[in-house]
Image (cartoon, rainbow, N blue to C red):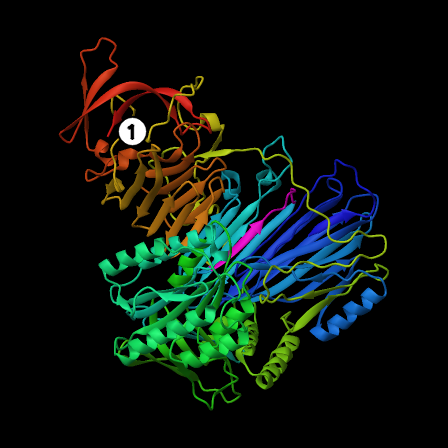
Amino acid sequence: MKTRAKMKTPASAHACGIVLVLLSLLAALQTTSAQKNDIDIYSLTVDSKVSSRFARTVVTSRVVNRADSAQEAIFQMELPKKAFITNFSMIIDGVTYPGNIKEKDAAQEQYSAAMARGESAGLVKATGRKMEQFQVSVSVAPAAKVTFELVYEELLKRHLGVYELLLKVRPQQLVKHLQMDIHIFEPQGISFLETESTFMTSALANALTTSQNQTKAHIRFKPTISQQQKSAEQQDTVVDGSFIVRYDVNRTLSGGSIQIENGYFVHYFAPVGLPTMPKNVIFVIDKSGSMTGKKIQQTREALIKILDDLSPKDQFNFISFNGKATQWKPSLVQASADNVKEARDYAANIQAHGGTNINDAMLMATQLLEKANREEQLPAGSVPLIILLTDGDPTVGVTNPTQIQKNVQDAIGGQYSLFCLGFGFDVSYAFLEKLALDNGGLARRIYEDSDSALQLQDFYQEVANPLMTAVTFEYPSNFVEEVTQNNFRLFFKGSEMVVAGKLQDQSPDVLSAKVHGQQSMQNITFQTESSVAEQEEEFRSPKYIFHGFMERLWAYLTIQQLLEQMVSASDADKRVLKTQALGLSLNYSFVTPLTSMVVTKPEGQGQSQVAEKPVENGNSHRNVHAAAAPGMPLGLPKLRQPGPVVHRRLYIPPHDDLDLSLHSLSAPTLADPVGDLHEDDVDLNIKETDPIARLPGTSSAVPDITQAPAVILPLPGQSTDRLCVDIKDSEGPMNLLSDPDQGIEVTGQYEKKRAQFSWIQVTFKKPQLQVHASPEHVVVTRDRRNTAYRWKETLFSVMPNFLMTMDEEGVLMLRSQDKVTIGLLYWKGPGQGVRLLLQDTNRFSSHVNGTFGQFYQGVLWVPSAAADDSERTLTVQGHNYPATREPKLDYQDGASGIEFSCWSVKL
């Protein structure tokens, strides 16, 4: 929500705001004030209820105008692209002004009429990578209070094994009553739950509570004013960033879970334990001139990573194209070690130039698969896939998009699945979407950013493990009706199939279902059943769920599928599908691409607004369009930046008794939110310290020639408490340290010429987690999911028995209960590069090894005959290393480091 005064504001005007964003549950609210505290948010609440993956979110903001003149408030929110707004209202002076959902054409008539009267009618069409924007504005009289309420709904989609919800919280002012509640109810049982935040401090961690039992979870964030403050002297808020919740449910090798509520059912199917089917995959890669630079570099990087993930049972080939299409090999090749190595060399040398001939490239791919099929080179039970990556529209050969779509569909003939990736916004997404949907696949936009290579890798991971083909769901036809899509071409590991429907009046006592499909070389059938009465009772009593949600889930899923079917339907079928989707949208009050919300306002305000749902089918971002009313400037006011950021560093000192269980890290207990649950109060002993005093050290002026060592190793219990290690000889990745008892492995690549690590990677067995640190960013991989974090992007991630934090100075700490604490940072001082930090090294086992790990196997110091004791010999596992006393920079202390005297060895 934004606010601005109608009167001219002084230059010292100060901006305040809040943004709330949920991914899979997402809302955004921003507020700016013309003068400090003119528009005061005195209450802001977010209440999200997730019932069997279906999420209903209510955002309520209460503001008061403390100025002596009227102020105009602009309410702005961001929500996920797959979410549907269902209600918006403003309460002003006790009068409710609702948003009315109408057919888009009717709403446009009202919009045009307002424009003809000279009134401003803001049409909201903004989109972002994962979200879209909705906004309204209203004039607030002096001392008047306004309540804004937004409601939206969404079915959470399982992605690489998890459901994820993200809140981006940015009040930019202290809020007296700030509260977020997330209730999750999953009858299958919650298998794991974790949270992550980019703004959490030790004070705020005490405002976060998590309670969980087998089927229910409640997460609450309710900070006090003092907890929100950056410091006692500052009135600015520290609450500024993202809050994420991830979870999954229990699963078995079965026909899935049928859940029933209020006469409707939903069937979730994602069996575990199925073997992965081999793939025959052709990568069709655009190497036209527009891919020059970072795009082709990131594509090469992603392809090399993807090749490493191929199974030896897979077959693959490359087709690269510009104005001409060329294939790497004359036929599909097995993903053997030698072939993958040769393919890596090929991918690393793809160069971008020339035009774009998509038609010939796609026909070449289908011909390759047809040839392999004729020559019986496609193993029985394998899955053929074509993955197209392009960044622009066709410019060479056949350039008519409709003709290309027809040619490709005719060539594929329903035999293969096509997945289309559009790199950036110069490509027609609508063209790629239809191309994919016509051929049993899907389209995805790859955003031009530092993580583009990761986006490509993550997409491949979604389709890397096919488990079943030709999946169909069968229900008793005399008991169910209006069933959503019940046949699917492919089922991939980490995803989930969802079918919903309505029970007939004469429904059975038990609803049964069969799921048929093909798995490798055999047909497979799963059977499952569910008691109607038991299911109805399970959803009837709880107060923390949104009752009647399953009917809305069915309507939501039906509308989404109808809209998708419209993309590849004929004109006649498209009209029928549109009528059905429009009827459901109006009946259930969903803002969809076929409807709009008209926001009613107090009489005399002179402005009406229409909110439409954007559709990602253009070549670029769509913007917010607003027409100026008389006397008002065109466009929206700009958010002013808050005051200077005060850097603070989180130092987590070593503890032998730190409890890192999920509940202990979740902060204090709620008042029995989900039953008889008991949690211990959080006590992370996180201390806010001055950056210079982060770790013990002696301060002095830092000479320009003094360098930071490759690593500083703490040696507790020895005569020398710290050892500086430099590397003079290295080739290829190094095993820096490995402790099989601790389940920790640290590897790295050291660049001898630049005297720095180009990357360091930490791998944990429990939880299964990999952290890859490079000068560009930190990439965390868990269960095939990659998440990139920029250095100094504050982070506070709580997993069962594991804590990951990053402070504003870019120090990443990885702490697990009863294990060595590992830190990573990108040091920009003299001798810059990625650096390793170690704490709690007394927890290393006797089996620790590696270039650095060897120094924890017992070190013998042999003094020299020199009178000044500046030289010694270090004996480690039978190896002798000369050690000298040298000035070094402690990269653990502040941005520029602090000089100290350190015993140094060179390896």
Q: Which residues are magenta?
A: 164-175
Percent x, y of residue 434: 52, 73
Q: Is residue 173 magenta?
A: yes
Q: Nearer the viewer, residue 124 or 321?
A: 321
Q: Is residue 377 left or right of residue 876?
A: right
Residue at x 32% of width, y 59% of height: 307
Residue at x 45% of width, y 66% of height: 186
Q: Nearer the viewer, residue 192 or 312?
A: 312
Question: Does any portion of residue 213 appear in the rendered image?
Answer: no
- Pointer 1 residue: 726
Q: Nearer the viewer, residue 267 or 762?
A: 762
Q: Nearer the viewer, residue 60 or 793?
A: 793
Percent x, y of residue 65: 77, 47
Q: Is residue 80 magenta?
A: no
Percent x, y of residue 683: 44, 39
Percent x, y of residue 489: 40, 77
Residue found farthest to the bottom: 478
Residue 865, above or below 814: above
Residue 882, above or below 664: above
Looking at the rendered image, the quarter that the C terminus falls into is: top left
Residue found farthest to the top: 867
Residue at x 21% of width, y 18% of height: 872
Q: Amino acid at mark 1?
A: Asp
The mark tally for this picture is: 1
For residue 816, what is the image quadrant? top left
Q: Is residue 854 left or right of residue 816?
A: left
Q: Quick one: label 1, few (<14), some, or many (20+) residues within 10 Å?
A: some
Give the structural element (helix, strand or loop) at label 1: strand
For residue 618, what is the image quadrant? bottom right
Question: Does any portion of residue 502 appear in the rendered image?
Answer: yes
Residue 175, above or below 373: above
